[in-house]
Image (spheres, rainbow, N blue to C red):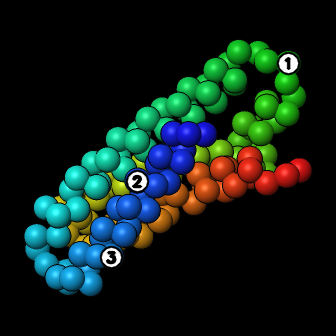
Amino acid sequence: MTLQVVHIVACFTLAAAASYRLMRAGPAPTAHRFLFPYIIAASLVGMVISYLYAMEFFVAYYSGSDNPHLAARLQPGSPYAWFYASLVLAPLLPAFAIFPWIGKRPLAVARLGILATLPGLIFVLGDLLPT
């Protein structure tokens, strides 16, 4: 959960830097050079999170676990399958900003940063809320 919080902070920092760049200089061609360190940080943390969730699901699915709840949530037809797929795929969204045709648009980079945090926020806030 700590790494998930680090990813949320990195993505919000990326979105804040993109918003700052957009307000300060507009969609200038040098925006990619300014945002590149933020993009790399958010992308690296996102790749680690995606790898960890993918390995967790792989081991749970192929281990033959007796936990029926765990097996049911990983089935493709389950009602929450989209959420578990988004936990693996959404943290990779900031990596698309590495490409210059996306990285030169600060508004697009900010949107990618915010969208990448949504499944993580739901997961972290769901753990913090009392049941």
Whether residues under marks 3 and 1 lie with C-beta atoms below 8 angstroms apart, the answer is: no
Q: Residue furthest left?
A: 30
Residue position for label 3: 19
Q: Identity of the amino acid at label 2? A: Ala
Instruction: Say which element carries label 3.
Output: helix
- From the viewer's perspective, is 17 left or right of 119? left
Q: Is residue 63 above or below residue 73?
A: above
Residue position for label 2: 10
Instruction: Say which element carries label 1.
Output: loop
Q: Position of residue 11 (x, y in %)?
A: 42, 57
Alpha carbon distance from label 3 to label 1: 48 Å
Between tags 3 and 1, which lies in front?
3
- From the viewer's perspective, is 54 left or right of 79? left
Q: Identity of the amino acid at label 3? A: Ser
Residue position for label 1: 66
Could you tell which of marks 3 and 2 lies nearer the N-terminus? 2
Alpha carbon distance from label 3 to label 2: 14 Å
Could you tell which of marks 3 and 1 lies nearer the N-terminus? 3
Residue displayed at 21% across by 82% down: 24
Image quadrant in which you'd find residue 113: bottom left
